[in-house]
Amino acid sequence: MGVEAEFVSLAGDVKEAVLWYGELRTAARRATLLPGGHTFTGDRGEVAPVAAPRGYL
């Protein structure tokens, strides 16, 4: 059973994180930007580079 992590941003601030399980999962990860309703998904198995924290996380 897979899980999708969705992060919802309102005006540049993360407001919530949601985990979708089972048939509600439609991607591996998702970012939803409000108020425009734009959604970005990632399914290709990309791995983000690991580095020390900088000005933002």
Image: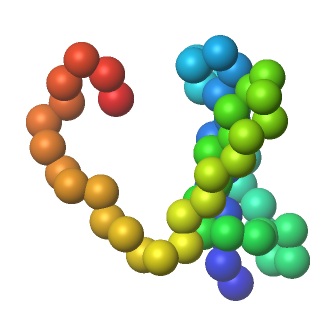
Q: Is residue 34 above or below residue 31?
A: above
Q: Splitting the image into 4 quarters, where does residue 10 fall?
A: top right
Relative to residue 57, is residue 50 depicted above or below? below
**Which quadrant of the view contains residue 42?**
bottom right
Q: Position of residue 3 (x, y in %)?
A: 66, 69
Image coordinates for residue 37, horizontal then vertical, percent:
80, 36
For the image, the number of numbered tags is 0
Vertical placement of residue 17 versus 19, above or below: above
Residue 29: % across, % down:
59, 60
The part of the image, by quadrant, that contains residue 32 is: top right
Q: Is residue 53 above or below residue 32?
A: above
Image quadrant where one finds the N terminus: bottom right
What sort of colour scheme is used for the picture? rainbow
Q: Quadrant of the C terminus?
A: top left
Q: Residue most toward the bottom?
A: 1
* Residue plotted at (60% across, 68% down): 28
Q: Residue furthest right?
A: 23
- Position of 12 with respect to 20 (left or right) is left
Q: Residue at x 30, y 57 (%)?
A: 48
Q: Residue at image x 37%, y 69%?
A: 46
Residue 48 in the figure: left or right of residue 34? left
